[in-house]
Amino acid sequence: MQANEMEPLYIKINDIDNTAIIVNEGGLKEGTVFTCGIELQRSIPQGHKVALETIEKDGEIIRYGEVIGYAKDRLEKGSWIRDSLMNLPIPPELSSLKTYGTVKAGEPLEEEYTFLGYKNSDGTVGVKNILGITTSVQCVVGVLDVAVQKVKEELLPKYPNVEDVIAINHNYGCGVAINAGDAKIPIRTIQNLAKHPSFGGEIMVVGLGCEKLQPVRLNDGKDDDNIVMLQEQNGFTNMIQAIMDMAEERLERLNQREREVFPISELVVGVQCGGSDAFSGVTANPAVGYATDLLVKAGATVMFSEVTEVRDAVHLLTPRAESKEVADALVREMDWYDKYLDKGDVDRSANPSPGNKKGGLSNVVEKSLGSVVKSGTSPIIDVVSPGDKVRKKGLNFAATPASDFVCGTLQLAAGMHVQVFTTGRGTPYNLSMAPVLKVSTRNELQNQWSDLIDINAGTIATGKATIEDVGWEIFHDIIDTASGTKTTCADKWGIKNDLALFNPAPIT
Amino acid sequence: MQANEMEPLYIKINDIDNTAIIVNEGGLKEGTVFTCGIELQRSIPQGHKVALETIEKDGEIIRYGEVIGYAKDRLEKGSWIRDSLMNLPIPPELSSLKTYGTVKAGEPLEEEYTFLGYKNSDGTVGVKNILGITTSVQCVVGVLDVAVQKVKEELLPKYPNVEDVIAINHNYGCGVAINAGDAKIPIRTIQNLAKHPSFGGEIMVVGLGCEKLQPVRLNDGKDDDNIVMLQEQNGFTNMIQAIMDMAEERLERLNQREREVFPISELVVGVQCGGSDAFSGVTANPAVGYATDLLVKAGATVMFSEVTEVRDAVHLLTPRAESKEVADALVREMDWYDKYLDKGDVDRSANPSPGNKKGGLSNVVEKSLGSVVKSGTSPIIDVVSPGDKVRKKGLNFAATPASDFVCGTLQLAAGMHVQVFTTGRGTPYNLSMAPVLKVSTRNELQNQWSDLIDINAGTIATGKATIEDVGWEIFHDIIDTASGTKTTCADKWGIKNDLALFNPAPIT
């Protein structure tokens, strides 16, 4: 059956909801009557909300069992509920969030799951075997890019067990307020990226010499032969040779490694959404949430993130904090971000994007409620500050901006092996340091971008699959991708987006 | 004569200076006696300052005829004056800067200078013939990079008059507070980069579809066939094809263009310094300042920049403002930046870098005094806000951060054709959109990086050339580089640093 031949369909999430979203591709016309008897007062696009009952002026508009807005005027049953007809609720008062420890950990999965990874010299486990070359400052990037190209052409073919050579380029390092309080965020991010588990425990840093972020800070404070300093070289040709020599030494060592079996408890997975629509919170994100629960129950580490998309649903999360410390840490990160936005004279209404709105998401409250579903139902056992490494196995909140690339970069710094990324509008987002599995929220996106979408959760909306079905599919695909037996669509095409640091401090 | 065989030499800039810098490579040993009779109280490295007379506690330490600090304790004649022995002066009070119009424009040069450039359909003139592809959001970069690689391999060889294909990648566009007051800076920067004069008046934008920075805003508000929208394509292969098709149309048109003779008044030159040392203000920057005066007198446009390196010398600049409006604009930009740093809880002492200090620059006051010398002696006829286009021919102050790449990006957005970049410590800095001529401050850097330095101003310190000699050399090299008859060292090696936007607003 074609989606557009389907009977008129809406999805209501929670019993107390007085809104639901239109499932049918292309939306539904004015006058359409649902089997429940509700008649559309006007045409409503796919993913947009219909009023299931008449809502009086100032009345609560409810989705996910939560108030997502207040009616500016009376909304008739069957009418289209749009952003312009709603007032934004006040965000949860952070000081009021006192509850924690209300959720128990699920029973461990009976089957023991494993993946194939690489044992690193520093005790960590990687899922790729990559030579990572860290930069201390943007000044060296032009030279390093030439060198990396030469390494790929002339050296890499000699070391077939090494999967890639990656320059960790960024725009930090000099011309920045390096002693500002917030400078610790970009600095520790680069420090942790340099030691990403998929780099095999090998450190290689290319520095200039006069920069503020001195290269020894990216090498555990040691001034040893892990560092090439360009100002110490005799011109460009020597710079290239010095980088190639240091790279080859490491390629030789990396090439000797082979995949071994590891328990899934060694795996660190990040979940993120981007280009979201109203289906994100109904199909893809709940399926990811189910997979998150499976991973946690299997002993793995999962991070969910995106402070500005959690802020308005944080009252649903603090009760799930394992301890008072974790609940306080959640609140502390929200509070820091409130103040950061405030300093820039903006507020949370800066999210969602025009595309989110076109996809049916009226405001950041609705977006948040759909976003946090990715976290499943497990207790939150730790909060990771931006740029920090993950410390505990289980479900973590990694406090990052919602910006896809900044979130991705910070999850990588935290030690992420594989990322699961849900999208409704569609984005070809990818990372070079970790595979990204893309999950579509709608069948139409899967059909349109069949060569970019790895997993389709749109089948949940049309009743062809359950949340559990897709959740298990995601779970198995994560393991296969980590093991190197499955290649993501974006990796097949060689799509590689740049890293994007989070630097809340000024530049100079 | 080798530099280290030279007699002991220091450079004093202004008659009233009580300090001078050591010229000799490797510095000078304790007990060295200069011909004037001064004896070194201890060894002093090259570029570092010697006290020419005894300075009492709290006494003024003077270089460039200006107070660069106050002695923390008595400093003996012949002693080494270091950062740690000085207190930083208070920066000029902005509200006190009332003088303007004290400088007259120089006589126009007798000879009329010209360069070979490309006439653009929009009336501007370019010095390169490049296809520039603008991005509205980081999401598209991974796909665009694959497409650009294919364009270079499969299409560019068919159009030999086109010099390059460049993707204008950046990390703005979504996940940002796009309605924040300061968001206008990154937005207008991208808008102006998209129309850079070396792109032949051709506009090509790759957008995603759901981003906050809607692609039409990079195409004069028009939703026409200058835009490829990835969310409208059927998967990855169609995205690549759509980009290639649009690129080829433009390559055909660009390929038909030829260089023509233009008066130098069509040329826009940016000057910048990076990796500075104590010689920057003595050799390279004064030579650039001389070239700046020549360019201005020949009718060209010159921009100098770097707010944090101008702030402490701004009292020397406002008197040179052509009018009260220009002086006020200078003060306004300084004030904006003071507040920007203040919001981040940092101050101007965040500049200089460790390498600057190693090179003899004690503090930001000394660095600033050496930096502003690049502006020559002409009247300042306009102030360009960050991301804005230059409006007037003559000497402009383009208010940018001092960060090399951010300054370079903003000077490009202002319409810069060629950049002159002075360096003492050495940086392989380059841009892909405009050639960068690198001028070394010391002979030792020229010797060490002979394949990266285009012009050596170190000869000024050793008396082998005058400021005028090197100034004219820079002037002629700018014209040759603009005309395409001279290739910079960095361009020969294919060094291309990434753009770096200035986004003082929060990300979300």
Image (cartoon, coloured by chain):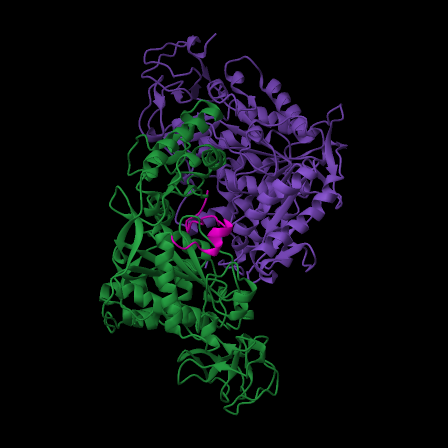
Chain colours: A purple, B green
Kindly indicate the quadrant of the structure image that contains residue B232.
top left
Q: Residue B370, position in %: x, y?
A: 42, 71
Q: Is residue A482 left or right of residue B456?
A: right
In the image, A250 versus B494, the foreground residue is B494
Q: Is residue A417 left or right of residue B406?
A: right
Q: Residue B406, position in %: x, y?
A: 43, 54
Residue A187: in sight, yes or no?
yes
Residue A414: in sight, yes or no?
no
Q: The magenta stretch spans which residues?
A: B485-508
Position of A491 relative to A201 (above/below):
above
Position of A246 relative to A381 (above/below):
below
In the image, A220 versus A342, the foreground residue is A220
Q: Quadrant of the N terminus of chain B?
A: bottom right
Q: Is residue B486 left or right of residue B450?
A: left
Q: Residue B482, position in %: x, y?
A: 35, 54
Residue farthest bottom in this picture: B37
In the image, B125 versus B404, the foreground residue is B125
Q: Main secondary structure of the magenta part?
A: loop
Q: Is residue B152 left or right of residue A144?
A: left
Kindly indicate the quadrant of the structure image that contains residue A163.
top right
Tally of numbered tags:
0
